[in-house]
Amino acid sequence: MGARDLLKRLLGESAVYGMAGAIQKSIGLFLIPIYTRCFTPEEYGVLALLSAFSVLFDIFIVLGLDNSAARWFYDTEEVEDRRITIASWFWCQLAVGLLTAAGLLLAAPLIAPLLLGEGGDVRLMSLVILLVPLGTFLKVTGNTLRYQRAAWKAATFSVVSALSTVGLVILMVVGLDLGMIGVYAGQIAALCLVAVVGALLLRPWIAPRHASRERLRQMLSFGLPLVPAGIASWVRLSSDRLILQSSWSEAEVGLFALAFQLAAVVGLCTSAFDMAYGPFAYSIHQQPHARDLYARVLTLFAFGGAWLCVVVSLFDDLIIALLATEAYASAASGVPMLCFSHLFYGMVGIASIGPGIVKKSGPVATSIFIAAAVSLGMNFALIPSLGRDAAALSNMCSSLAAAAWLFWQGQRLYPIPYRFGGVAACVLTAWAIVAVDTFFINDHGHFATAIRALMALGYLTLALPLGISRLAREA
Protein backbone atom coordinates (compact mmCIF):
# COMPACT_ATOMS: atom_id res chain seq x y z
CA MET A 1 0.00 0.00 0.00
CA GLY A 2 1.43 3.36 -1.07
CA ALA A 3 1.86 6.44 1.10
CA ARG A 4 -1.16 8.12 -0.49
CA ASP A 5 -3.39 5.14 0.28
CA LEU A 6 -2.06 4.98 3.83
CA LEU A 7 -2.75 8.68 4.32
CA LYS A 8 -6.30 8.22 3.05
CA ARG A 9 -6.77 5.35 5.47
CA LEU A 10 -5.50 7.50 8.35
CA LEU A 11 -7.85 10.33 7.42
CA GLY A 12 -10.76 7.92 7.10
CA GLU A 13 -10.09 6.33 10.47
CA SER A 14 -9.58 9.75 12.06
CA ALA A 15 -13.00 10.78 10.73
CA VAL A 16 -14.63 7.74 12.29
CA TYR A 17 -12.78 8.14 15.58
CA GLY A 18 -13.47 11.85 15.32
CA MET A 19 -17.20 11.22 15.25
CA ALA A 20 -16.94 8.94 18.27
CA GLY A 21 -14.44 11.17 20.02
CA ALA A 22 -16.54 14.23 19.33
CA ILE A 23 -19.43 12.66 21.21
CA GLN A 24 -17.34 11.00 23.93
CA LYS A 25 -15.22 14.06 24.64
CA SER A 26 -18.14 16.42 24.26
CA ILE A 27 -20.06 15.03 27.23
CA GLY A 28 -19.10 18.16 29.14
CA LEU A 29 -20.16 20.37 26.22
CA PHE A 30 -23.52 18.62 25.90
CA LEU A 31 -24.14 19.16 29.59
CA ILE A 32 -23.06 22.82 29.74
CA PRO A 33 -26.60 24.16 29.19
CA ILE A 34 -27.80 21.90 32.01
CA TYR A 35 -24.97 22.67 34.41
CA THR A 36 -24.97 26.44 33.87
CA ARG A 37 -28.71 26.61 34.52
CA CYS A 38 -28.76 24.24 37.48
CA PHE A 39 -25.48 25.22 39.14
CA THR A 40 -23.77 28.48 40.03
CA PRO A 41 -20.17 29.17 38.89
CA GLU A 42 -19.09 28.19 42.42
CA GLU A 43 -20.79 24.79 42.11
CA TYR A 44 -19.38 24.34 38.61
CA GLY A 45 -15.99 24.97 40.18
CA VAL A 46 -16.60 22.20 42.72
CA LEU A 47 -17.38 19.80 39.86
CA ALA A 48 -14.09 20.81 38.22
CA LEU A 49 -12.12 20.14 41.41
CA LEU A 50 -13.71 16.72 41.82
CA SER A 51 -12.92 15.94 38.19
CA ALA A 52 -9.27 16.81 38.83
CA PHE A 53 -9.24 14.36 41.74
CA SER A 54 -10.73 11.55 39.63
CA VAL A 55 -8.10 12.06 36.93
CA LEU A 56 -5.30 11.71 39.50
CA PHE A 57 -6.89 8.54 40.86
CA ASP A 58 -7.14 7.10 37.34
CA ILE A 59 -3.45 7.74 36.67
CA PHE A 60 -2.50 5.67 39.70
CA ILE A 61 -4.60 2.64 38.85
CA VAL A 62 -3.71 2.48 35.14
CA LEU A 63 0.04 2.23 35.95
CA GLY A 64 0.97 3.23 32.41
CA LEU A 65 -0.43 -0.04 31.05
CA ASP A 66 -2.52 1.69 28.40
CA ASN A 67 0.71 2.87 26.74
CA SER A 68 2.34 -0.53 27.17
CA ALA A 69 -0.63 -2.37 25.69
CA ALA A 70 -0.47 -0.28 22.52
CA ARG A 71 3.19 -1.12 21.99
CA TRP A 72 3.05 -4.84 22.83
CA PHE A 73 -0.13 -5.41 20.84
CA TYR A 74 1.64 -4.60 17.57
CA ASP A 75 4.70 -6.73 18.28
CA THR A 76 2.90 -9.74 16.82
CA GLU A 77 0.08 -10.68 14.47
CA GLU A 78 -0.88 -13.69 16.61
CA VAL A 79 -4.30 -13.19 18.18
CA GLU A 80 -3.53 -15.36 21.21
CA ASP A 81 -0.46 -13.35 22.06
CA ARG A 82 -2.40 -10.11 21.70
CA ARG A 83 -5.04 -11.48 24.08
CA ILE A 84 -2.33 -12.04 26.68
CA THR A 85 -1.49 -8.32 26.47
CA ILE A 86 -5.10 -7.16 26.85
CA ALA A 87 -6.04 -9.61 29.61
CA SER A 88 -2.94 -8.80 31.65
CA TRP A 89 -3.73 -5.08 31.43
CA PHE A 90 -7.43 -5.45 32.22
CA TRP A 91 -7.14 -7.62 35.34
CA CYS A 92 -4.27 -5.62 36.78
CA GLN A 93 -6.08 -2.29 36.36
CA LEU A 94 -9.37 -3.62 37.70
CA ALA A 95 -7.76 -5.19 40.78
CA VAL A 96 -5.65 -2.14 41.60
CA GLY A 97 -8.65 0.13 41.04
CA LEU A 98 -10.97 -1.77 43.37
CA LEU A 99 -8.40 -2.06 46.14
CA THR A 100 -7.46 1.62 45.93
CA ALA A 101 -11.11 2.68 45.83
CA ALA A 102 -11.81 0.72 49.01
CA GLY A 103 -9.05 2.57 50.84
CA LEU A 104 -10.11 5.97 49.51
CA LEU A 105 -13.73 5.40 50.51
CA LEU A 106 -12.60 4.88 54.10
CA ALA A 107 -10.56 8.10 53.89
CA ALA A 108 -13.27 10.14 52.12
CA PRO A 109 -14.25 12.09 55.29
CA LEU A 110 -10.65 13.34 55.46
CA ILE A 111 -10.13 13.94 51.73
CA ALA A 112 -13.32 15.95 51.08
CA PRO A 113 -12.42 18.90 53.36
CA LEU A 114 -8.87 19.01 51.99
CA LEU A 115 -10.06 19.26 48.39
CA LEU A 116 -13.32 21.17 48.77
CA GLY A 117 -12.75 23.11 51.96
CA GLU A 118 -14.69 22.92 55.19
CA GLY A 119 -18.11 21.41 54.65
CA GLY A 120 -16.97 19.47 51.57
CA ASP A 121 -19.61 16.91 50.67
CA VAL A 122 -18.38 13.41 51.54
CA ARG A 123 -21.16 11.88 49.45
CA LEU A 124 -19.87 13.61 46.32
CA MET A 125 -16.33 12.49 47.07
CA SER A 126 -17.45 8.88 47.57
CA LEU A 127 -19.33 8.78 44.28
CA VAL A 128 -16.31 10.17 42.42
CA ILE A 129 -14.13 7.46 43.96
CA LEU A 130 -16.52 4.77 42.72
CA LEU A 131 -16.41 6.14 39.18
CA VAL A 132 -12.74 5.41 38.54
CA PRO A 133 -12.51 1.59 38.83
CA LEU A 134 -15.77 1.29 36.87
CA GLY A 135 -14.05 3.18 34.07
CA THR A 136 -11.71 0.22 33.51
CA PHE A 137 -14.22 -1.40 31.15
CA LEU A 138 -14.62 1.80 29.13
CA LYS A 139 -10.87 2.38 28.78
CA VAL A 140 -9.82 -1.19 27.96
CA THR A 141 -12.72 -1.89 25.60
CA GLY A 142 -12.33 1.34 23.64
CA ASN A 143 -8.57 0.94 23.27
CA THR A 144 -8.77 -2.73 22.31
CA LEU A 145 -11.22 -1.96 19.52
CA ARG A 146 -8.86 0.76 18.28
CA TYR A 147 -5.87 -1.58 18.39
CA GLN A 148 -7.85 -4.03 16.26
CA ARG A 149 -8.48 -1.15 13.82
CA ALA A 150 -12.22 -1.83 14.24
CA ALA A 151 -12.99 1.84 13.71
CA TRP A 152 -16.76 1.63 13.32
CA LYS A 153 -17.18 -0.76 16.22
CA ALA A 154 -15.03 1.51 18.40
CA ALA A 155 -17.06 4.50 17.28
CA THR A 156 -20.36 2.79 18.06
CA PHE A 157 -19.14 1.78 21.50
CA SER A 158 -17.99 5.32 22.27
CA VAL A 159 -21.23 6.85 21.03
CA VAL A 160 -23.39 4.49 23.08
CA SER A 161 -21.37 5.10 26.25
CA ALA A 162 -21.38 8.88 25.75
CA LEU A 163 -25.08 9.16 25.00
CA SER A 164 -25.87 6.91 27.96
CA THR A 165 -23.87 9.19 30.23
CA VAL A 166 -25.54 12.36 28.95
CA GLY A 167 -29.03 10.87 29.14
CA LEU A 168 -28.65 9.43 32.63
CA VAL A 169 -27.02 12.58 34.03
CA ILE A 170 -29.86 14.72 32.66
CA LEU A 171 -32.38 12.27 34.15
CA MET A 172 -30.72 12.42 37.57
CA VAL A 173 -30.07 16.18 37.64
CA VAL A 174 -33.20 17.50 35.95
CA GLY A 175 -35.76 14.70 36.05
CA LEU A 176 -35.10 13.51 39.61
CA ASP A 177 -33.77 16.88 40.86
CA LEU A 178 -30.77 15.30 42.60
CA GLY A 179 -28.52 18.31 42.06
CA MET A 180 -24.78 17.70 42.13
CA ILE A 181 -25.30 14.18 43.48
CA GLY A 182 -27.18 13.44 40.26
CA VAL A 183 -24.11 14.32 38.16
CA TYR A 184 -22.19 11.39 39.59
CA ALA A 185 -25.13 9.04 40.12
CA GLY A 186 -25.86 9.35 36.39
CA GLN A 187 -22.23 8.70 35.47
CA ILE A 188 -22.07 5.62 37.69
CA ALA A 189 -25.27 4.22 36.17
CA ALA A 190 -23.86 4.79 32.67
CA LEU A 191 -20.55 3.12 33.52
CA CYS A 192 -22.39 0.08 34.90
CA LEU A 193 -24.15 -0.23 31.54
CA VAL A 194 -20.84 0.24 29.72
CA ALA A 195 -19.23 -2.44 31.90
CA VAL A 196 -21.83 -4.99 30.79
CA VAL A 197 -21.42 -4.11 27.11
CA GLY A 198 -17.63 -3.99 27.42
CA ALA A 199 -17.48 -7.37 29.14
CA LEU A 200 -19.51 -8.91 26.30
CA LEU A 201 -17.33 -7.34 23.61
CA LEU A 202 -14.07 -8.27 25.35
CA ARG A 203 -15.15 -11.71 26.47
CA PRO A 204 -12.57 -13.61 24.38
CA TRP A 205 -9.88 -11.04 25.19
CA ILE A 206 -10.10 -10.79 28.97
CA ALA A 207 -10.56 -14.43 29.92
CA PRO A 208 -8.48 -14.89 33.11
CA ARG A 209 -6.53 -17.72 31.51
CA HIS A 210 -4.92 -15.25 29.12
CA ALA A 211 -3.45 -13.08 31.90
CA SER A 212 0.30 -13.55 32.23
CA ARG A 213 2.58 -12.46 35.06
CA GLU A 214 5.57 -12.37 32.74
CA ARG A 215 3.78 -10.22 30.18
CA LEU A 216 2.50 -7.95 32.94
CA ARG A 217 6.04 -7.60 34.29
CA GLN A 218 7.32 -6.60 30.85
CA MET A 219 4.51 -4.12 30.33
CA LEU A 220 4.94 -2.60 33.77
CA SER A 221 8.65 -2.11 33.13
CA PHE A 222 7.67 0.05 30.15
CA GLY A 223 4.59 1.67 31.68
CA LEU A 224 5.60 2.42 35.28
CA PRO A 225 8.17 5.08 34.31
CA LEU A 226 5.25 6.91 32.71
CA VAL A 227 3.26 7.03 35.98
CA PRO A 228 5.31 9.90 37.45
CA ALA A 229 4.93 11.53 34.05
CA GLY A 230 1.18 11.02 34.32
CA ILE A 231 1.20 12.71 37.70
CA ALA A 232 3.22 15.54 36.19
CA SER A 233 0.61 15.80 33.45
CA TRP A 234 -2.04 16.03 36.14
CA VAL A 235 -0.07 18.85 37.76
CA ARG A 236 0.02 20.64 34.42
CA LEU A 237 -3.74 20.34 33.97
CA SER A 238 -4.97 20.65 37.55
CA SER A 239 -2.61 22.81 39.57
CA ASP A 240 -4.24 25.88 38.06
CA ARG A 241 -7.62 24.91 39.49
CA LEU A 242 -6.22 24.35 42.98
CA ILE A 243 -4.27 27.62 42.94
CA LEU A 244 -7.28 29.49 41.58
CA GLN A 245 -9.37 28.08 44.41
CA SER A 246 -6.89 29.11 47.09
CA SER A 247 -6.06 32.52 45.58
CA TRP A 248 -9.48 33.49 44.28
CA SER A 249 -12.62 31.35 44.64
CA GLU A 250 -14.56 28.32 43.42
CA ALA A 251 -16.37 30.71 41.05
CA GLU A 252 -13.08 31.57 39.33
CA VAL A 253 -12.40 27.84 39.02
CA GLY A 254 -15.84 27.40 37.49
CA LEU A 255 -15.31 30.10 34.87
CA PHE A 256 -11.91 28.69 33.95
CA ALA A 257 -13.40 25.19 33.73
CA LEU A 258 -16.06 26.44 31.32
CA ALA A 259 -13.40 28.08 29.13
CA PHE A 260 -11.49 24.80 29.14
CA GLN A 261 -14.62 22.92 28.10
CA LEU A 262 -15.23 25.27 25.18
CA ALA A 263 -11.61 24.98 24.04
CA ALA A 264 -12.09 21.21 24.21
CA VAL A 265 -13.78 21.54 20.82
CA VAL A 266 -10.21 21.70 19.53
CA GLY A 267 -9.04 19.07 21.99
CA LEU A 268 -11.64 16.52 21.00
CA CYS A 269 -10.59 16.82 17.35
CA THR A 270 -6.87 16.55 18.11
CA SER A 271 -7.44 13.65 20.51
CA ALA A 272 -9.62 11.87 17.95
CA PHE A 273 -6.74 12.21 15.50
CA ASP A 274 -4.28 10.90 18.11
CA MET A 275 -6.53 7.92 18.75
CA ALA A 276 -6.21 6.95 15.10
CA TYR A 277 -2.63 8.12 14.57
CA GLY A 278 -0.86 6.14 17.29
CA PRO A 279 -1.94 2.64 16.15
CA PHE A 280 -1.63 3.72 12.50
CA ALA A 281 1.91 5.07 12.89
CA TYR A 282 3.15 2.00 14.76
CA SER A 283 1.54 -0.36 12.27
CA ILE A 284 3.47 1.14 9.29
CA HIS A 285 6.79 1.95 10.94
CA GLN A 286 8.63 -0.80 9.05
CA GLN A 287 7.53 0.47 5.63
CA PRO A 288 10.17 2.41 3.65
CA HIS A 289 8.10 5.58 3.15
CA ALA A 290 6.85 5.79 6.74
CA ARG A 291 9.05 8.70 7.80
CA ASP A 292 8.00 10.90 4.91
CA LEU A 293 4.36 10.17 5.69
CA TYR A 294 4.91 11.10 9.37
CA ALA A 295 6.36 14.43 8.22
CA ARG A 296 3.40 15.22 5.97
CA VAL A 297 0.97 14.33 8.74
CA LEU A 298 2.48 16.96 11.07
CA THR A 299 2.09 19.74 8.48
CA LEU A 300 -1.49 18.77 7.71
CA PHE A 301 -2.29 18.51 11.40
CA ALA A 302 -0.85 21.95 12.13
CA PHE A 303 -2.73 23.53 9.23
CA GLY A 304 -6.11 22.05 10.15
CA GLY A 305 -5.66 22.38 13.90
CA ALA A 306 -4.61 26.02 13.78
CA TRP A 307 -7.62 26.87 11.62
CA LEU A 308 -9.91 25.21 14.16
CA CYS A 309 -8.27 27.29 16.89
CA VAL A 310 -9.02 30.41 14.85
CA VAL A 311 -12.68 29.52 14.37
CA VAL A 312 -13.35 28.69 18.03
CA SER A 313 -11.40 31.74 19.26
CA LEU A 314 -13.16 34.19 16.94
CA PHE A 315 -16.62 33.00 17.94
CA ASP A 316 -16.09 32.09 21.62
CA ASP A 317 -18.46 34.81 22.85
CA LEU A 318 -21.22 33.55 20.57
CA ILE A 319 -20.65 29.95 21.66
CA ILE A 320 -20.89 30.89 25.33
CA ALA A 321 -24.05 32.91 24.69
CA LEU A 322 -25.60 29.83 23.07
CA LEU A 323 -24.51 27.27 25.65
CA ALA A 324 -24.30 29.09 28.98
CA THR A 325 -26.02 31.77 31.02
CA GLU A 326 -24.90 35.38 31.42
CA ALA A 327 -23.15 34.52 34.69
CA TYR A 328 -20.51 32.66 32.68
CA ALA A 329 -19.94 35.25 29.90
CA SER A 330 -16.54 36.40 31.17
CA ALA A 331 -15.11 32.89 30.67
CA ALA A 332 -14.48 33.75 26.99
CA SER A 333 -11.21 35.57 27.70
CA GLY A 334 -9.27 32.37 28.28
CA VAL A 335 -10.65 30.35 25.38
CA PRO A 336 -8.08 31.29 22.66
CA MET A 337 -5.04 30.36 24.74
CA LEU A 338 -6.64 27.08 25.80
CA CYS A 339 -7.46 26.26 22.16
CA PHE A 340 -3.81 26.62 21.17
CA SER A 341 -2.83 24.60 24.23
CA HIS A 342 -4.88 21.69 22.87
CA LEU A 343 -3.24 22.11 19.47
CA PHE A 344 0.28 22.01 20.91
CA TYR A 345 -0.50 19.03 23.09
CA GLY A 346 -1.87 17.23 20.06
CA MET A 347 1.57 17.74 18.53
CA VAL A 348 3.06 15.98 21.56
CA GLY A 349 1.25 12.83 20.43
CA ILE A 350 2.83 13.14 16.98
CA ALA A 351 6.27 13.84 18.42
CA SER A 352 6.07 10.76 20.66
CA ILE A 353 5.95 8.36 17.71
CA GLY A 354 9.72 8.38 17.13
CA PRO A 355 10.65 7.51 20.73
CA GLY A 356 7.82 4.98 20.80
CA ILE A 357 9.10 3.19 17.72
CA VAL A 358 12.52 2.71 19.35
CA LYS A 359 10.77 1.80 22.65
CA LYS A 360 12.19 4.74 24.61
CA SER A 361 9.64 6.17 27.02
CA GLY A 362 12.11 8.48 28.78
CA PRO A 363 11.82 11.45 26.40
CA VAL A 364 8.02 11.36 26.58
CA ALA A 365 8.14 11.33 30.37
CA THR A 366 10.69 14.16 30.44
CA SER A 367 8.57 16.32 28.14
CA ILE A 368 5.65 15.98 30.53
CA PHE A 369 7.81 16.93 33.51
CA ILE A 370 8.99 20.00 31.62
CA ALA A 371 5.38 20.94 30.90
CA ALA A 372 4.46 20.46 34.56
CA ALA A 373 7.36 22.62 35.72
CA VAL A 374 6.44 25.41 33.32
CA SER A 375 2.79 25.21 34.31
CA LEU A 376 3.41 25.09 38.05
CA GLY A 377 5.95 27.92 37.99
CA MET A 378 3.76 30.21 35.91
CA ASN A 379 0.66 29.35 37.92
CA PHE A 380 2.26 30.25 41.23
CA ALA A 381 3.80 33.41 39.78
CA LEU A 382 0.83 34.75 37.83
CA ILE A 383 -2.50 33.36 39.07
CA PRO A 384 -2.60 35.20 42.43
CA SER A 385 -2.54 38.55 40.64
CA LEU A 386 -4.05 37.80 37.21
CA GLY A 387 -6.53 35.00 37.87
CA ARG A 388 -7.90 32.53 35.35
CA ASP A 389 -6.37 34.16 32.25
CA ALA A 390 -2.94 33.50 33.74
CA ALA A 391 -3.98 29.88 34.16
CA ALA A 392 -4.89 29.73 30.47
CA LEU A 393 -1.56 31.29 29.47
CA SER A 394 0.46 28.86 31.58
CA ASN A 395 -1.51 25.94 30.15
CA MET A 396 -0.65 27.02 26.59
CA CYS A 397 3.03 27.66 27.36
CA SER A 398 3.40 24.31 29.09
CA SER A 399 1.95 22.46 26.07
CA LEU A 400 4.27 24.32 23.72
CA ALA A 401 7.29 23.50 25.90
CA ALA A 402 6.39 19.80 25.95
CA ALA A 403 5.99 19.63 22.17
CA ALA A 404 9.23 21.51 21.48
CA TRP A 405 11.27 19.29 23.80
CA LEU A 406 9.82 16.04 22.48
CA PHE A 407 10.37 16.94 18.83
CA TRP A 408 13.99 17.83 19.63
CA GLN A 409 14.62 14.57 21.46
CA GLY A 410 12.61 12.50 19.00
CA GLN A 411 14.72 13.74 16.09
CA ARG A 412 17.84 12.49 17.85
CA LEU A 413 16.39 9.00 18.36
CA TYR A 414 14.43 8.56 15.15
CA PRO A 415 14.95 11.37 12.59
CA ILE A 416 11.87 12.36 10.60
CA PRO A 417 11.95 15.08 7.89
CA TYR A 418 9.36 17.33 9.51
CA ARG A 419 8.66 20.70 7.88
CA PHE A 420 8.85 22.86 11.00
CA GLY A 421 8.81 26.09 9.01
CA GLY A 422 5.35 25.29 7.68
CA VAL A 423 4.13 24.39 11.15
CA ALA A 424 5.38 27.72 12.52
CA ALA A 425 3.68 29.59 9.67
CA CYS A 426 0.34 27.97 10.54
CA VAL A 427 0.59 28.82 14.22
CA LEU A 428 1.87 32.39 13.77
CA THR A 429 -0.78 33.20 11.17
CA ALA A 430 -3.50 31.87 13.45
CA TRP A 431 -2.13 33.86 16.40
CA ALA A 432 -2.07 37.04 14.31
CA ILE A 433 -5.72 36.61 13.30
CA VAL A 434 -6.82 36.01 16.89
CA ALA A 435 -4.76 39.01 18.09
CA VAL A 436 -6.44 41.30 15.55
CA ASP A 437 -9.84 40.15 16.77
CA THR A 438 -8.90 40.53 20.44
CA PHE A 439 -7.42 44.02 20.24
CA PHE A 440 -9.24 45.69 17.34
CA ILE A 441 -12.70 44.12 17.02
CA ASN A 442 -14.75 44.68 20.14
CA ASP A 443 -18.20 44.68 18.55
CA HIS A 444 -20.47 41.62 18.50
CA GLY A 445 -22.96 42.78 15.87
CA HIS A 446 -23.66 41.28 12.47
CA PHE A 447 -20.95 43.30 10.71
CA ALA A 448 -18.28 42.21 13.21
CA THR A 449 -19.43 38.59 12.87
CA ALA A 450 -19.07 38.85 9.08
CA ILE A 451 -15.55 40.28 9.46
CA ARG A 452 -14.61 37.37 11.75
CA ALA A 453 -15.96 34.88 9.23
CA LEU A 454 -13.84 36.48 6.48
CA MET A 455 -10.78 36.33 8.73
CA ALA A 456 -11.35 32.63 9.36
CA LEU A 457 -11.66 32.00 5.63
CA GLY A 458 -8.60 34.17 4.99
CA TYR A 459 -6.47 31.78 7.03
CA LEU A 460 -7.20 29.01 4.52
CA THR A 461 -5.27 30.88 1.82
CA LEU A 462 -2.16 29.72 3.67
CA ALA A 463 -2.77 26.37 2.00
CA LEU A 464 -1.30 27.68 -1.25
CA PRO A 465 2.24 28.60 -0.11
CA LEU A 466 2.37 25.53 2.12
CA GLY A 467 1.33 23.20 -0.70
CA ILE A 468 -1.30 21.52 1.46
CA SER A 469 -3.14 19.93 -1.47
CA ARG A 470 0.15 18.56 -2.81
CA LEU A 471 1.08 17.10 0.56
CA ALA A 472 -2.30 15.41 0.78
CA ARG A 473 -2.16 13.81 -2.65
CA GLU A 474 1.55 12.91 -2.89
CA ALA A 475 2.20 9.23 -3.34
Image (cartoon, grey):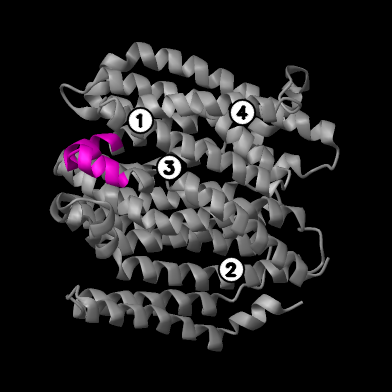
The magenta region covers 32-47
Q: Which residue is mark 4?
A: 197
Please state which of residues 446 and 358 is positioned toward the viewer in this rendering. Answer: 446
Task: Residue 57: tell me if it is visible.
Answer: yes
Q: Residues within 10 Å of mark 4 (few under 14, many from 20)?
A: some
**Residue drawn at 47 percent across, 80 percent down:** 425
Please state which of residues 468 and 182 is positioned toward the viewer in this rendering. Answer: 182
Task: Residue 224: tell me if it is visible.
Answer: no
In the displayed structure image, the side of residue 441 where residue 68 appears, left or right: right
The secondary structure type at the circle numbered 2 is: helix
Amino acid on which disc 3 is placed: Ala
Q: CA distance from mark 1 to mark 2?
A: 42 Å
Q: Which residue is mark 3?
A: 232
N-term mark: 3 or 1:
1
N-term mark: 1 or 2:
1
**Residue drawn at 21 percent across, 23 percent down:** 120
Q: Is residue 388 above or below residue 3?
A: above
- Image location of residue 382, percent across then percent down: 20, 55
